[in-house]
Image (tube, rainbow, N blue to C red):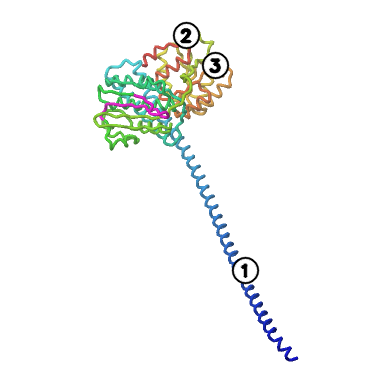
């Protein structure tokens, strides 16, 4: 019996050892599971911390984006407000400066037409007119520079015939070249096969400035050469070369700076120092460029490069539609009636004196809109000249009133105003004015307008004005 129990002892010891090992395995597994759970808890905690940081960063970023967006909106609103204020300032400045210039240039022109003056008086009046024209040019160029720099200059890009444009410019400036005994070699007018993408009016402005500079800064008896070529399919290059004193290399980059005439302000050569700057900015705004090449003692060459216009078929030449007065029932009358509504006595006197040279026109005047409207209804004038800035009721409201009455609903009304910004002129024509003349009045243009609007008018005074 004892021997049987002794035989079980090894078995018991092995079972106990196996049980101990199993317990150790369970402890190890439990420890491993605990470690994994701790690691998972740490990972979860770290992930939560990262998510919290990302959330905070996103919230901060969204706040910064919102603040930056608000800053940009505020800056845009402020820029628009500043641009509006600048435009308003330019418009007011244009009006305030042009109003006195209308009297200065108008009466000096009138003296040259009808005045019996001594040679000395003619010279003095000529000085007045030249100084007035210089000041008017300065006003226009300063306003143009301000508009193009603020991005508010209007452009109407279209296909423009290079040859026709150059022909117009050369015909206008040829008398200036003749005065200096300059030879104008025009190789560009014949290039009517070339077209560029440009604003027709602005391109003429650029070429007028460059060609007039080539004339002014040339030597007596020199040469002005105008040429045009197409260096590639995308570009047309217009060049104006002179035989003047030339520009040194260190000054060539300064020539386009506003008001920098490089010492020419101390000479008798007229100029403002703004023209080239405007030319460069206008050309760039049309997608082109202006280059200068010059050699001291030889001369200078300015080249305007513009995009070539791809033109299929023929290009029709645009011509302005001429409009005549609507008073067909009066076509057989020898005398026409013009009503001028203007509150400035000097302007009234100027137009009165201009029309004194016309035996076919009777002038009526009114110094405010209500009086002018009443005269228009009772007298039925053939043409009404209307100032815009009238006291009490402005020219736009007066025009609207005239259109409401049957007697004046079809009257021909032309605006004459010192509000001469392009936006002013466009607004006036959109409102229904048949034409819009800017002050100071150019007498030749004024008389041409009369001939266009009034049938059977004599044209002798235009010849005198020229």
Q: Which residue is mark 2?
A: 334
- The mark closer to the camera, 1 or 2, is 1
Residue 263 picture quarter: top left
Residue drawn at 25 percent across, 25 percent down: 219
- The mark closer to the camera, 2 or 3, is 2
Residue 267: x, y in percent?
A: 26, 30
Give yes or no for residue 243 being in the magenta stretch. Answer: yes
Which of disc 1 and disc 3 is earlier in sequence?
A: 1
221 relative to 38 in the view: left or right: left
Where, quadrant-wise, is the N terminus in this rendering? bottom right
The number of callouts visible is 3
Question: Could you tell me what secondary structure mostly forms the magenta stretch?
Answer: strand
Which of disc 2 and disc 1 is earlier in sequence?
A: 1
> In the orientation shown, which residue stands out farthest toward the right?
1
| Cα separation between marks 3 and 1 | 105 Å
- The mark closer to the camera, 3 or 1, is 1
Residue drawn at 51 percent across, 10 percent down: 331
Marks 1,2: beta carbons within 8 A: no
Residue 251: x, y in percent?
A: 29, 36
In the rendered structure, which segment of residues is drawn in magenta?
227-245
- Compare residues 97 and 353 and report the one nearer the observer: 97
Instruction: Report crowding for label 3: few under 14, some 14 to 19, many 20 or more residues within 10 A (C-alpha).
Output: few
Instruction: Report crowding for label 1: few under 14, some 14 to 19, many 20 or more residues within 10 A (C-alpha).
Output: few
Asked which secondary structure carries label 1, the reply is helix
- Note whether residue 440 is visible: yes
Which of disc 3 and disc 2 is earlier in sequence?
A: 2
| Cα separation between marks 2 and 3 | 20 Å
Residue 44 picture quarter: bottom right
Asked which secondary structure carries label 2, the reply is loop
Q: Which residue is mark 1?
A: 37
Marks 3,1: beta carbons within 8 A: no
- Note whether residue 91 is visible: no
């Amino acid at each position: 019996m004892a021997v049987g129990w002794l035989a079980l002892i090894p078995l018991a010891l092995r079972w106990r050892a196996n049980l101990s090992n199993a317990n150790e395995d369970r402890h190890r597994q439990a420890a491993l599971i605990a470690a994994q759970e701790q690691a998972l808890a740490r990972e979860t905690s770290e992930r939560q911390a990262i998510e919290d940081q990302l959330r905070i960063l996103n919230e901060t970023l969204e706040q910064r984006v919102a603040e930056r967006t608000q800053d940009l909106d505020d800056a845009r609103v402020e820029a628009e407000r500043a641009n509006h204020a600048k435009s308003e300032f330019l418009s007011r400045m244009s009006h305030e400066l042009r109003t006195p210039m209308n009297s200065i240039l108008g009466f000096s022109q009138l003296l040259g037409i009808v005045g019996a003056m001594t040679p000395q008086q003619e010279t003095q009046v000529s000085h007045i007119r030249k100084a007035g024209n210089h000041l008017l040019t300065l006003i226009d160029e300063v306003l143009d520079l301000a508009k193009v720099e603020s991005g508010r200059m209007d452009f109407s890009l279209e296909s423009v015939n290079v040859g026709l444009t150059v022909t117009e410019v050369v015909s206008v400036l040829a008398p200036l070249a003749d005065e200096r005994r300059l030879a104008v070699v025009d190789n560009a007018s014949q290039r009517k096969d070339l077209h560029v993408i440009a604003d027709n009016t602005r391109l003429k402005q650029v070429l007028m400035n460059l060609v007039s500079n080539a004339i002014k800064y040339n030597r007596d008896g020199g040469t002005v050469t105008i040429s045009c070529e197409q260096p590639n399919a995308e570009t047309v290059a217009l060049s104006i070369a002179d035989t003047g004193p030339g520009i040194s290399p260190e000054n060539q980059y300064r020539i386009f700076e506003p008001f920098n005439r490089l010492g020419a302000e101390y000479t008798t050569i007229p100029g403002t120092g703004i023209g080239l700057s405007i030319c460069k900015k206008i050309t760039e705004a049309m997608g082109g460029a202006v280059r200068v090449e010059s050699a001291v003692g030889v001369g200078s060459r300015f080249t305007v490069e513009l995009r070539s216009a791809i033109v299929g078929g023929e290009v029709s030449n645009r011509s302005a539609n001429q409009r005549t007065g609507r008073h067909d029932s009066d076509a057989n009358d020898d005398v026409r009636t013009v009503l001028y509504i203007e509150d400035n006595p000097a302007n009234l006197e100027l137009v009165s004196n201009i029309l004194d040279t016309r035996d076919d026109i009777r002038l009526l005047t009114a110094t405010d809109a209500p009086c002018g409207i009443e005269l228009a209804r009772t007298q039925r004038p053939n043409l009404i000249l209307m100032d815009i800035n009238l006291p009490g009721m402005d020219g736009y409201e007066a025009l609207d009133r005239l259109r409401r009455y049957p007697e004046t609903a079809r009257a021909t009304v032309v605006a004459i105003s010192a509000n001469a910004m392009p936006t002013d002129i466009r607004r006036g024509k959109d409102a229904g004015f048949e034409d819009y003349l800017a002050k100071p009045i150019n007498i030749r243009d004024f008389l041409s307008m009369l001939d266009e609007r009034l049938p059977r008018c004599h044209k002798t005074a235009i010849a005198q004005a020229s």
